[in-house]
Image: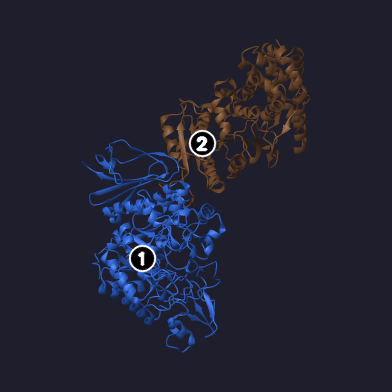
Chain colours: A brown, B blue
């Protein structure tokens, strides 16, 4: 059910004109004119190629773009007013834009798109990032297909990544989500995914967006809802995903993902506390693929960030971490780049102690999240060092080992969950 | 008796297509005839049609349902005599019903005496009346039309030991229109029937009259020259007579058949018909508006002929591959329904016997620019029999009543030219004229009503069209205009209720009068005009400034 005041009258008018659809493709934008062209082109081509008979609408929720983003999206419409003989389509394709506010808010954007999909009774909603310039038309099939044809409720992406890309997912989000919720979803926070109509209805009706974790990370909250609600989940290999060229605010990203994940633990304790180990989820295409190319990363900078964080945030960290763990971090902070090692077992305990402190709100929750960032930098440094000359298989083996650590130490999280002061 | 042929009468005609064989059998031999047809002209008059198009009724071996003619100046004995035809023509005219007959110009039967003479020897005077060749590789760029049955456009004649050209079945050799004697003879054939009083011809397969190497042998300039010559003779000697082209072509290729108003008066709009079916199923006006956008202007004296179904398969030649696949999947799930590049089904079964969709489709047929043709039996929702082979399944006996043979014939059922439709949904006991006449809300009664409304206003026949493009793509809306008369047509192509806002500011100040119930709708103002429409509903509004 859509919330009453979420959708503007203008948006509703556009939805009325679109009518019932089979598939919604959602784009959350804000000043994406530089990248949206090829993205919307690939989406249009994907619809014509993969779903020529289905009723599809592209819904663009825009956070107040000052450039041509919305016009570029709307121009991808195929109808009888714009005659384009190069594009042959069986039916009309509406591309509609709604400006939900003057300040970009990914949560409201996603909620707007999903509410639109819900009102249009879409069987499947595919979310695509406007920055995904590597998108190919087949992504539509790979994301929407399992949901539309096979009734899967959530289709998460798998990307071909450069070896050292996606550290946050690899070091924290994947292993933590896997150990907590018991499903091996490689990209629980993908910028592309597909969701079924019934999961959308559940998401909109059960008030997740009114809870901290929903507000903080609407995308990951859909994944968590799918797992806790025992919806049918799969993952689908898409292909190369290039990191956004836009500035990357790590703190914001950690807040939006790890923060939401931590926050989700409160209400879902009865569910996750009983889960041990993890289960694979159905995967279409390859489960993981890394390219040998790697971007240049300043290891010294990572170490400095870690060391200065441990030093400067000593008081904060002492409110979050157990004394032995903090002492160990202080010890490794003193190491040079060549000897530096932030082992998986220690990292796992760090994350779990942060999660427990977050639960207990030992200090301001946002400060807890921010304090995790320099430590995450340290863990990333270890990953770089360990895998400097590693093959794809080596990296995968270490990743699996890290996940095993998270699963093995989950009882520790349960132990400190209630006890920790 | 002849009806006065006012110029442009065909623009305001409602044409009823019927095969004599299928309509009524007066002499009890199991085959419909002219005597029977004449008896039932009152039915057609009641229905409101004012023109009848007769499929071929000439002597023929009937290997292609009469399109294989063996004598152009007579009537097939099964259907009666020439006098029976004259009597029918006279009664039709008395009732204000014009008669259009079929003229198969392109080819004859291989049983026609002309062909028999032609094949008899290379020196026969009629040898050059057909297209002969020692090799079967000429005109290679020419497509084969009957893909399911023919491998080549050439057939070997063992008698004259050479190949003859045929665009349709191999038993239908093409006449050679490069021969002036053929052209003259065919004009004499037309003249024969015109002197009897027929009001028009439907000229069959006109794009294929001439063959030229290096072309696809369709729509050639020489073909147009022949048409212009025939038209000139018609206008000079039989003014008011109408020529209707059967040319299954894209609109741009069809346009030349109107010439400068000096070739055909009318031509079938073949590409529109499948797109109407597509639009209703997709619930999207795009296929319809797009093909009409691509339809060129035609001379003022000319007119398109629109139809939903006819005696042939629902042709899918003038659609793209993706559209054809869609149409097959949606409308011909059973492969037995497919024939050549088309679907051999009647209107009601195609539309799942959904009364609302049948009405909507007829509503569009009657309100889009052109002259509508109703295929016999579709006005009562007759069904088909896809197991009868070729196109016979849509040519079954007319269903007049629930009695013996559906009132078609008093013959033993086994003797009928075709088994009647018997199934419980579409059979004559369920679907027939008699029972529908007794029901004011039957499909037939509704058809009477819409035909009367269509005929009450010349805008539909002669008016211009301007499409409105409401943002709701499930709504097909257009304005028909002629002089001061304006009609707004709004069709909901969707199976669900729809809201639509129409930009009618150009007509500000007018009130809308719904033409079926004559109810008044609110006056048009500055704001978008909001309509809510039920599933498959359509409105015809007359605009009045009061």
Mark 1 highlights which residue? B53
In the image, B292 versus A395, the foreground residue is B292
Q: Nearer the viewer, mark 2 or mark 1?
A: 1
Mark 2 highlights which residue? A121
Task: Report the residue at 68% width, 25% height from top.
Answer: A301
Task: Report the residue at 38% width, 42% height from top.
Answer: B470
Q: Does residue B65 lie above or below A274 as drawn? A: below
The residue furthest left is B546
**Horizontal and vertical percent position of residue B40:** 34, 64
Indicate the chain on which mark 1 is placed: B
Marks 2/1 in contact by CB < 8 Å: the verdict is: no
**Horizontal and vertical percent position of residue A352:** 71, 20
Residue A125 located left or right of residue A289 = left
Residue A259 located left or right of residue B521 = right
Badge 1: few (under 14), some or many (20 or more) residues near its Cα, within 10 Å? many
Task: Report the residue at 57% width, 45% height from top.
Answer: A137
Q: Quadrant of the C terminus of chain B?
A: top left
Q: Is residue A304 visible?
A: no
Q: Quadrant of the N terminus of chain B?
A: bottom left
In the image, B492 versus A242, the foreground residue is B492
Q: Does residue B302 lie above or below A212 as drawn? A: below
Q: CA distance from mark 2 to mark 1?
A: 47 Å
Residue A136 located left or right of residue B36 = right
């Amino acid at each position: 059910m859509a919330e009453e005041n979420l959708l503007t009258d203008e948006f509703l008018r556009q939805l009325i004109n679109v009518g019932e659809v089979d598939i919604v493709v959602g784009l959350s934008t804000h000043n994406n004119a530089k990248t949206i062209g090829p993205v919307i082109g690939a989406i249009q081509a994907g619809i014509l190629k993969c779903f020529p008979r289905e009723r599809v609408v592209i819904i663009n929720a825009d956070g107040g773009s000052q450039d041509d983003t919305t016009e570029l999206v709307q121009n991808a419409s195929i109808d009888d007013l714009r005659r384009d003989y190069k594009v042959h389509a069986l039916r009309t394709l509406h591309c509609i834009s709604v400006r939900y506010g003057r300040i970009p808010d990914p949560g409201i954007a996603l909620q707007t798109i999903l509410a639109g999909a819900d009102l249009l009774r879409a069987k499947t909603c595919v979310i695509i990032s406007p920055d995904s310039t590597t998108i190919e038309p087949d992504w539509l099939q790979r994301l929407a297909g399992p949901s539309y044809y096979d009734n899967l409720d959530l289709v998460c992406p798998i990307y071909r990544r450069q070896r050292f890309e996606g550290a946050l997912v690899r070091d924290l989000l994947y292993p933590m989500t896997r150990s907590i919720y018991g499903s091996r979803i490689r990209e629980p926070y993908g910028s592309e995914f597909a969701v079924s109509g019934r999961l959308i209805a559940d998401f909109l009706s059960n008030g997740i967006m009114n809870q901290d974790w929903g507000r903080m990370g609407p995308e990951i909250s859909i994944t968590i809802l799918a797992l806790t609600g025992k919806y049918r989940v799969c993952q689908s290999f898409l292909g190369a995903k290039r990191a956004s060229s836009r500035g990357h605010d790590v703190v914001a990203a950690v807040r939006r993902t790890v923060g939401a994940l931590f926050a989700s633990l409160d209400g879902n304790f009865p569910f996750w506390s009983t889960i041990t180990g993890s289960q694979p989820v159905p995967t279409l295409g390859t489960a993981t693929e890394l390219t040998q190319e790697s971007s240049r990363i300043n290891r010294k900078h990572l170490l400095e960030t870690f060391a200065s964080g441990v030093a400067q945030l000593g008081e904060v960290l002492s409110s979050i971490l157990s004394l032995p763990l903090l002492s160990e971090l202080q010890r490794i902070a003193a190491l040079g780049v060549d000897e530096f090692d932030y082992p998986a077992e220690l990292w796992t305990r760090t994350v779990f102690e942060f999660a427990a402190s977050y639960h207990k709100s030992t200090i301001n929750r946002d400060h807890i999240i921010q304090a995790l960032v320099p430590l995450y930098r340290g863990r990333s440094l270890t990953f770089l060092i360990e895998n400097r000359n590693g093959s794809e298989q080596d990296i995968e083996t270490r990743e699996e080992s890290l996940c095993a650590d998270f699963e093995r130490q989950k009882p520790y999280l349960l132990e400190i969950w209630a006890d920790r002061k | 008796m002849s009806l006065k042929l006012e110029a442009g009468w065909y623009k305001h005609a409602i044409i009823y297509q019927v095969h004599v064989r299928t309509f009524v059998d007066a002499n009890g031999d199991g085959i419909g005839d002219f005597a029977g047809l004449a008896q039932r002209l009152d039915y057609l008059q009641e229905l409101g049609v004012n023109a009848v198009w007769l499929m071929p009724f000439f002597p023929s071996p009937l290997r292609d349902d009469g399109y294989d003619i063996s004598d152009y100046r007579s009537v097939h004995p099964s259907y009666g005599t020439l006098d029976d035809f004259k009597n029918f023509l006279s009664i039709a005219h008395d009732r204000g019903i014009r008669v259009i007959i079929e003229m198969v110009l392109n080819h004859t039967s291989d049983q026609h005496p002309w062909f028999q003479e032609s094949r008899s020897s290379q020196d026969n005077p009629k040898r050059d009346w057909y297209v002969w060749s020692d090799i079967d590789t000429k005109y290679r760029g020419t497509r084969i039309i009957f893909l399911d049955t023919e491998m080549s456009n050439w057939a070997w004649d063992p008698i004259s030991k050479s190949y003859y050209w045929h665009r349709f079945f191999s038993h239908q050799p093409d006449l050679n229109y490069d021969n002036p004697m053929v052209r003259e003879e065919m004009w004499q054939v037309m003249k024969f029937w015109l002197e009897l009083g027929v009001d028009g011809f439907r000229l069959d397969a006109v794009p294929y009259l001439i063959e030229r190497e290096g072309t696809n042998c369709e729509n050639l300039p020489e073909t147009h020259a022949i048409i212009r010559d025939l038209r000139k003779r018609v206008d000079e000697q039989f003014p008011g007579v109408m020529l209707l082209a059967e040319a299954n072509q894209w609109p741009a290729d069809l346009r030349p058949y109107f010439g400068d108003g000096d070739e055909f008066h009318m031509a079938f709009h073949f590409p529109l018909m499948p797109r109407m079916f597509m639009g209703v199923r997709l619930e999207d006006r795009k296929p319809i508006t797009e093909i009409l956008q691509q339809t060129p202007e035609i001379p003022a004296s000319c007119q398109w002929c629109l139809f939903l179904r006819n005696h042939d398969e629902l042709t899918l030649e003038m659609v793209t591959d993706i559209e054809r696949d869609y149409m097959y999947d949606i409308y011909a799930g059973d492969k037995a329904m497919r024939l050549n590049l088309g679907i051999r089904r009647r209107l009601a079964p195609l539309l799942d016997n959904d009364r609302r969709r049948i009405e909507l489709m007829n509503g569009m047929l009657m309100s889009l620019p052109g002259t509508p043709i109703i295929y016999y039996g579709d006005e009562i929702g007759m069904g088909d029999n896809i197991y009868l082979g070729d196109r016979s399944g849509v040519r079954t006996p007319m269903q007049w009543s629930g009695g013996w043979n559906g009132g078609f014939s008093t013959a033993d059922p086994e003797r009928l030219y075709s088994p009647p439709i018997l199934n419980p949904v579409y059979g004559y006991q369920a679907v027939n004229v008699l029972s529908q006449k007794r029901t004011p809300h039957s499909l037939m009664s509704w058809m009477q009503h819409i035909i009367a409304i269509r005929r009450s206003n010349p805008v539909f026949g002669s008016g211009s069209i301007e499409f409105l493009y409401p943002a709701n793509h499930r709504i097909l809306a257009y304005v028909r205009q002629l002089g001061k008369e304006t009609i707004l047509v709004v069709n909901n192509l969707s199976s669900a209720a729809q809201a639509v806002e129409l930009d009618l500011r150009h007509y500000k100040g007018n009130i809308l009068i719904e033409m079926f119930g004559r109810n008044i709708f609110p006056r048009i103002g500055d704001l978008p005009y909001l309509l809510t429409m039920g599933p498959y509903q359509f409105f015809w509004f007359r605009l009045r400034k009061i």
